[in-house]
Image: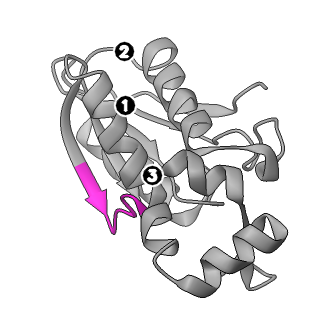
Amino acid sequence: PPLAFRVSHGDGDARCPGLMLCVGLQSVMDSKKSDALAEDAKRRGQSVVRFDYRGHGLSGGQFDKCLISDWLCDALDVMDTVCTGPQVLVGVSLGGWIAQLVASKRPASVVGLVLLCPATDFTCKILQDPAVHDELKAVGRYQMPSEYTSSGSITLSRMLIEDGN
């Protein structure tokens, strides 16, 4: 599916690394956090690349059909085709985990990481709860409580959680 992205070009020193923002689970590139980051980077003359993973925001795809590995592929695709020059990856929550994975796969392109509450391996932590394990086995999905969604939860498929492990 097509990925939505935005590039804010900086006017500063071309040797200054760009920033690539990896948002959190069910977060989108057009948010107050993302806008603030882009505005601050512009003042410093840095470029910022932000994007929506498939199944999120303006990108194509269905969230309930997506896996952690799909979102990693999305981030790698953006790194390879949209970003120019060295990058500092800024990852928030799930995006912190994705940013770490991108850095491990593209070490020559990543010169730094800024991780805000990284949800590294959150899928492993979810499975430590026997009730979650039972729900996944019985119905194939888990309703993860979330104060950041209007419904109060995020539906995670068994396939997504297994893929993350």
Is residue 117 shown in magenta?
yes
Contact (CB < 8 A) between labels 2 and 1? yes
Q: Is residue 165 left or right of residue 96?
A: right
Front in this rendered view, residue 47 or 20: 20
Marks 2 and 1, the one that precedes in the sequence: 1
The Cα atoms of the two marked residues, 3 and 1, are separated by 19 Å
Marks 3 and 1, the one that precedes in the sequence: 1
What kind of element bears circle 1? loop
Q: Which residues are magenta?
A: 114-121
Residue 43: tell me if it is visible.
yes
What kind of element bears circle 3? helix
Q: Quadrant of residue 105?
A: top left
Q: How far from the left and from the top, in percent, is residue 31?
A: 59, 60
Q: Residue tagged by mark 1?
A: 47
Contact (CB < 8 A) between labels 3 and 1? no
Is residue 135 shown in magenta?
no
Q: How far from the left and from the top, in percent, is residue 145?
A: 65, 84
For label 2, count other residues whose C-alpha is less than 10 Å away and answer few (under 14), some (14-19) or many (20+). some
- Mark 3 vs mark 1, foreground winner is 3
- Mark 2 vs mark 1, foreground winner is 2
Front in this rendered view, residue 75 or 41: 75
For label 1, count other residues whose C-alpha is less than 10 Å away and answer few (under 14), some (14-19) or many (20+). many
Residue 84 has which mark? 2
The Cα atoms of the two marked residues, 2 and 1, are separated by 9 Å
Q: Residue tagged by mark 3?
A: 95
For label 3, count other residues whose C-alpha is less than 10 Å away and answer few (under 14), some (14-19) or many (20+). many
Task: Write the residue at 51% across / 53% down.
Answer: 23
Is residue 110 depicted above or below 28 in this figure?
above
| Identity, as a three-letter code, of the amino acid under mark 3 | Gly
The secondary structure that most of the magenta stretch takes on is: loop
